[in-house]
Amino acid sequence: MTVEICLTQLADSMVSAKVAAWLKKEGDFVAEGEPIVEVETDKASVEITAPASGVLDRINVPAGTENVNVGAVLAHIRQEAER
């Protein structure tokens, strides 16, 4: 099963953010709850955690991308059973 990592709305007024940095790279194992990407809003820098454990399969939005809309799929995690 593949799990999407989406940009969630971190504040009531937030409509977009910048993907500042990926803390993991494609092919890395990630544990559920582990910080994997840092995003910047107009007011704060926030780490988004992995919603599930598995392999960071594909990053859709590279670091440095600005104006990423809330709800955008940032990346996919492939759960271990899919090898």
Image (cartoon, grey):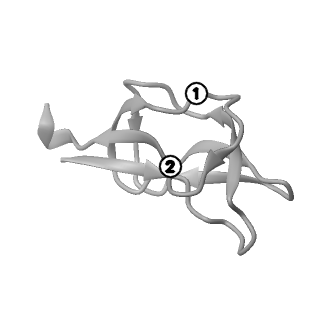
Q: Position of residue 4 (x, y in %)?
A: 36, 49
Q: Is residue 8 left or right of residue 82?
A: right
The image quadrant of residue 12 is bottom right
- Amino acid on which disc 2 is placed: Ala
User: Which residue reaches farthest bottom?
Assistant: 12
Return the residue at label 2. 72
Label 1 vs 2, first from the N-terminus: 1
* 49 relative to 75, above or below: below
Circles 1 and 2 in contact, beta carbons < 8 Å: no
Disc 1 marks which residue? Answer: 62
Report the residue at 60% width, 34% height from top.
23
Q: Residues within 10 Å of mark 1 (few under 14, many from 20)?
A: some
Give the structural element (helix, strand or loop) at label 2: loop
Find the distance from the CA under tag 1 to the CA under tag 2. Answer: 12 Å
Residue 34 in the figure: left or right of residue 4 = right
**Residue 83, image x, y percentages:** 13, 30
Give the residue type at disc 1.
Pro
SS at circle 1: loop
Q: Nearer the viewer, residue 21 or 18?
A: 18
x and y, in percent, of residue 25 in the image: 49, 26
